[in-house]
Amino acid sequence: MRGADLFPVLAATWPQRTFAEVGPFVVPEPDAGGNRVSAARLSDASGDTVEALDVVEAAMEVQGRAPLFQVLDHQSTLEGALGARGYIARDHTDILVVEAKALAKVPPPVTAFDIWPPLAIQVELWAEGGIDAARLGVMHRAIGPKTSVFGRIKDQPAGAAYVAMDGDIAMLHALEITPHLRRNGLAAIMMEAAADWAVQNGAAWLSVLVTQENAAAQGLYASLGLKPVGSYHYREKREP
């Protein structure tokens, strides 16, 4: 499996609201749901070209925003062209996967539950971590199999995550543990519960996206057997 294989899953589980096709690129409308639903990207994740780059930049400028591109690790032609135009690289992100059945485990009693739509307390937990209404709107837009995972530890509500599927791959997003209840093993339990839900719904793989500077999350996922299969980052136009 390659990182490019996961991009249709990302598009399905964290979907853009509206977009236009400009040459080989997809150009979304700006979205408060974050960079993943706002950045221009090549419509074929396996491709690498700078065709129509001027037109794509102009289209985003008409939208009233600085041009923003999502660049996969193998897209060296696009990467070089954007660098030459003064784009700044940021938010380097790894794409990790694990066989779902290898991670799946029924959670201990009263620790993790899959439920859709999310409970009000999950919305509050997400809000504590900066996962706002716009990002919740992205979750609700997804049309395939999906759920949320609600976590409890020490008899307290403590965690929320969202997981959805495309084909036989599930992708987990927005894993949030309330700060004062971290380091009690709940994140691992919730990941195992998400994998169990994925297996029950026919998934062979569970995937996550994690920024390279997030050492705590990188350590958690490595301890659970998730392996990197690719990476991406964003290139944003530097202000003149």
Image (cartoon, rainbow, N blue to C red):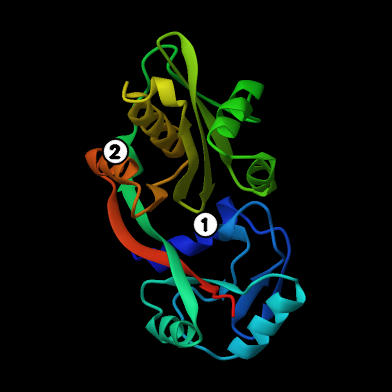
Residue type at the position of mark 1: Leu
Judged from the image, the secondary structure of the residue bearing numbered disc 2 is: helix
In the foreground, 212 or 223: 212
Of pointers 1 and 2, the one earlier in the residue sequence: 1
Q: Is residue 158 above or below residue 98?
A: above
Q: Amino acid at mark 2?
A: Leu
The percent coordinates of residue 130 (x first, y second) are: 57, 39
Q: Circle 1 sits in a helix, a strand or a loop, which is it?
A: helix
Compared across the picture, whether 56 is left or right of 219 comes to right
Residue 215 percent coordinates (x, y): 30, 45
Q: Which residue is at a point 61% across and 21% down the rendered structure image?
A: 121
Q: Quadrant of the N terminus?
A: bottom left
Quarter of the view holding residue 89 = bottom left
Residue at 36%, 76% in the rendered image: 74
Q: On screen, 156 above or below 211? A: above
In front of the other: 96 or 86: 86
* Closer to the eye: label 1 or 2: 2
Say which residue appears at 38% left-offset and 82% top-offset: 76
Q: Is residue 79 left or right of residue 53?
A: left
Mark number displayed over residue 59: none
Image quarter hosting the C terminus: bottom right
Q: Check residue 220 in the rendering and tell me which mark sits there, or answer none.
A: 2
Q: Position of residue 200 (x, y in %)?
A: 45, 34
Image disc number at residue 10:
1
